[in-house]
Amino acid sequence: MPHTVAVVVGSLRKESFSLKVAHAFAKIAPPLLKLQIVTLHGLSFFNQDLEATPPADWVSFRETIQKSDAVLFVTPEYNRSIPGVLKNAIDHASRPYGQSAFAGKPAGVIGVSVGVIGTAVAQQNLRNILAYLDVPTLGQPEAFIQAKEGLFEPDGSIAAASKQFLQQWVDRYVAWVKTYAT
């Protein structure tokens, strides 16, 4: 039986490397994973004053996470952290307090950036947040992908030089999901 995975893309940019990696991931993921790529366009800012009667965009995002068996975060790194839009989304789905849609769902964290350290610091920041939210997060292997010439094939897939590495990461993530997903 396939596991539904919400692939949360932490970038809004039209030509986002994170979105490209999410789509490339979908091309090499096994049929056991049913991937739903989730972009954060149109998700309004979190405001605790609206928690009792949340706007429709909040409810929709929370339901997407609740209905998933697992989550995969694909993040860029902005100023040595995750983008504000990703933190905003996490705040939405983790509220109201004690009712986090993320709790107990197995997660993976990957990222892509033009910097030579990829998204190492952003991923660590994200892992700290996920630990607090009771999200079992795959620790190894880590995937800090540098966006550079030759990373993607013209069809959007990962080029041969990086494909084996990403495939190994995918295989480990699948095992993680199978272990924790209910």
Image (cartoon, rainbow, N blue to C red):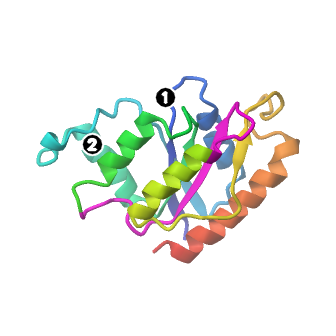
Q: Residue at image x 52%, y 74%?
A: 180
Between residues 39 and 32, which one lies in front from this camera angle? 39
Residue under label 1, please give it. 12
Please state the total of marks drawn on the protein image.
2
- In the image, taking residue 160 as reference, residue 68 lies left or right, namely left
The crowding category of the residue bearing disc 1, from other C-alpha atoms within 10 Å (few below 14, some 14 to 19, many at least 20), is some
Rendered image quadrant of residue 159: top right
- In the image, taking residue 177 as reference, residue 59 lies left or right, namely left
Please state the horizontal and vertical placement of residue 21, each as a whole percent of the image: 66, 40
Q: What amino acid does circle 2 point to? A: Trp
Label 1, secondary structure: give it. Answer: loop
Please state the horizontal and vertical placement of residue 90, each as a whole percent of the image: 38, 48
**Residue 39 vertical placement versus 33 (above, below):** above
Between residues 7 and 115, which one lies in front from this camera angle? 115
Q: Residue at image x 57%, y 68%?
A: 177
Q: Check residue 58 in the rendering and tell me which mark sits there, or answer none.
A: 2
Distance, label 2 to label 1, CA atoms, is 17 Å
Label 2, secondary structure: give it. Answer: helix
First in sequence: mark 2 or mark 1? Answer: 1
